[in-house]
Each structure stands twice: as structure tokens, then as C-alpha cells.
Amino acid sequence: MQFEQIAGLTAAACWASGSFIYSRLDAPAAALNLGKNAIAGVLLLVSVPFFGIGLDVWMDAPWGDYLWLILSGLVGILIGDSAYFRSIQILGPRKALVLTTLTPPISALLGWFWLAESLETVHLLAMGVTLAGISMVIRDRNLASDRSGHHQGTLRDGILLGIFAASCQSLGIALSKKVMMSSFPALEVSAIRIGVAVVGGLLVAVVSGALPGWKKKLLQRGVPGRIFVASVVGTYIGIWLSHISAEYYSLAIATTQMSTTPIFMVLLVGIFLRKKISATAFLGMVLAIVGVAILMQPTGWIF
């Protein structure tokens, strides 16, 4: 297994750990998103001088690439992650994470139409298998049992938010991929995207007057430490590794690796919450995993 493959799978494990922590916190989704982006943004900016490739790339990059990354940060992280956090608050982390397996087929289509990445019949079949598995899981009402209970919402809203989040995240990573093909590498892309999301989140909080309330929620006893851990593991390390994977592989393959997050989440929920998964939901999870596994096969792979 090459390092890039390990990076994608490790990113999935990081996101599962972070999502599990975020789902247990009593704070608005947008506030959690701003908090984790601020922490991860500082860490990424500190990392750039040590692990980046120097100032030349910043000076030589065309303004168009900066604009793509700004749009990527706003759509994929500011909007997409806020919708995702709200989805895990309503549905619980396991069901919400299963919806994120929509990201590979969406990314595959974006890569095919926009970045000229190949997409064969076997890939389309894999998308169908993945979607079939997802439909089985989201019909299992027992999966709501891992919700924290802090923020209620309808099943329909949670599912729609999860699908919307997957679409935003797919577009965000596609925009990032376009830039990584021409100028910025993974670390710099991660830092710019997160930085844009921090600025955008602060503007939303100030204009809406929500900043004092968000601050109060994020500074509750026990919350800052857990947000810090989740931000370091799930955002700082996770987003960096995800961009490393996307830099070297097609969008379909990279996001497929990252969509293995539900596997790690099932383990976390089973260990820490002692929850059992129904046979139907388990079968759906297996089917979704089989689908993304097929999607990862090399071009021209035949059954």
C-alpha cells in the first residue's frame, strides 16, 4: 500500500474520531464549525513554514487559483461542514456518515465532466451499489439511537442536510483538485481553504449577532478541550491527509478511500456507546463498503 492510499484511509479514521466528538457537544453546528476551523487554521498556518514548499508558490500562483480556493473554502468547509454537523446532530454520527458515501459518486461525476478524469461502466455500477447500501441504512430507524439528544430535528431534514453536505464537500474537493493540478500542493491548499472558512464564519457570526451566544456555548465547561482534540485529529490532520490523497489520485478514488469513515465510526460507537447495529443496517453498510471498494479498482478492471 502506497503512502497516498494510507493518507486517504487515515483521513477517514480521523474524520470518524472528530465526528464522534462533535456529535456529543451541545453547541450550534455553525459554532462548532467555526471553532474547529479556527484551531485547525492556526495549526496549518504554523505548519506551512516547516512543511510547505516555500514562498515561490505563493508568488507564482495565478489569481484564478486563489479565487478557486476561496470558493472551495466557502462551499466545501464553511457551508458543507456546517450542514454536515447539523446532520450528525439530528441523525447521529453513524447514519450521517453513511450519507457521506454519496461523496465518491458525486466527485466521480465532477472529475469526469470537469477534470477529464476517466469514468467507466464499472464505476457507474459501483455508484449504484453504494447508493443501494445507503438507502438500506437510512431506512433503519434504530440508527437514531446514537444521537446526543442536544439538538432535535426531523429525519427528513437530517437526510437532506447530509446529502447537501456531501454535494458541497464534493464540489469543494473538486475545486481544490483543480488548483493542486496547477499550483498549490496539499498543505497550502488546506491552509487557504480553512483560513477562508474562518474569515467567512466570523463574518456570518458578527453580521447575524450570533457571536456572543456561540462563544458562550463553545466555552462551556469541558467543551474547549474536546473541540481542540477533535479539531487536531479530525480537521488539522484529516484535511491535510485528504488533500494528499486527492493530489495524487482521481477524485473518485480519493473520496472513496475517505468514505470508509463509517467503518471506523461503527467501531467507535460500539466501543464507547455500546450500541448494536441491526442486521439490515449492517448489510447496508457492507453493501456500501463493497460499492466504494469496487470504485477504487484500477481503470479497466473487469469482474
Image (spheres, rainbow, N blue to C red):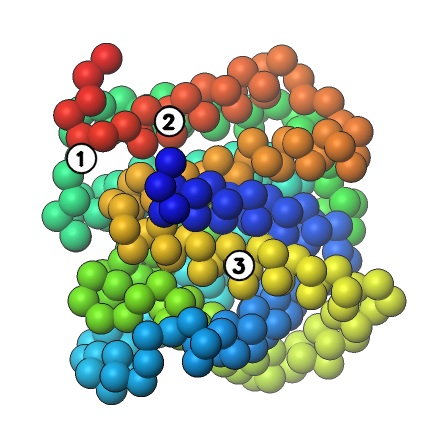
Q: Earlier in the sequence, mark 1 or mark 2?
A: 1
Q: For this view, does 13 lie left or right of residue 111?
A: right
**Which picture quadrant has residue 59?**
bottom left
Q: Residue 51: give x, y in percent of width and height.
A: 42, 71
User: How far apart are the two marked residues, 2 and 3, measured between alpha carbons?
Assistant: 23 Å
Q: Secondary structure at mark 2?
A: helix
Disc 2 versus disc 3: nearer the observer: 3
Do residues under tags 2 and 3 come within 8 Å of each other at their CB atoms? no
| Residue name at image x 61 percent, y 23 percent | 140
| Position of the N terminus by quadrant | top left
Q: Earlier in the sequence, mark 1 or mark 3?
A: 1
Specify few, some or many for label 1: CA neighbours under 10 Å numbering under 14, 14-19, or 20 or more: some
Tag 1: amino acid: Leu
Which of the labelled discs sits on residue 119, or is there none? Answer: 1
Which of the labelled discs sits on residue 237, or is there none? Answer: 3
Specify few, some or many for label 3: CA neighbours under 10 Å numbering under 14, 14-19, or 20 or more: many
Disc 1 versus disc 2: nearer the observer: 2
Q: Nearer the viewer, residue 95 or 182?
A: 182
Q: Nearer the viewer, residue 171 or 60?
A: 60
| Position of the C terminus by quadrant | top left
Residue wearing tag 2 = 293
User: How far apart are the two marked residues, 1 and 2, measured between alpha carbons?
Assistant: 15 Å
Tag 2: amino acid: Ala
User: How far apart are the two marked residues, 1 and 3, measured between alpha carbons?
Assistant: 29 Å
| Residue name at image x 48 percent, y 66 percent | 78
Q: Nearer the viewer, residue 90 or 284?
A: 284
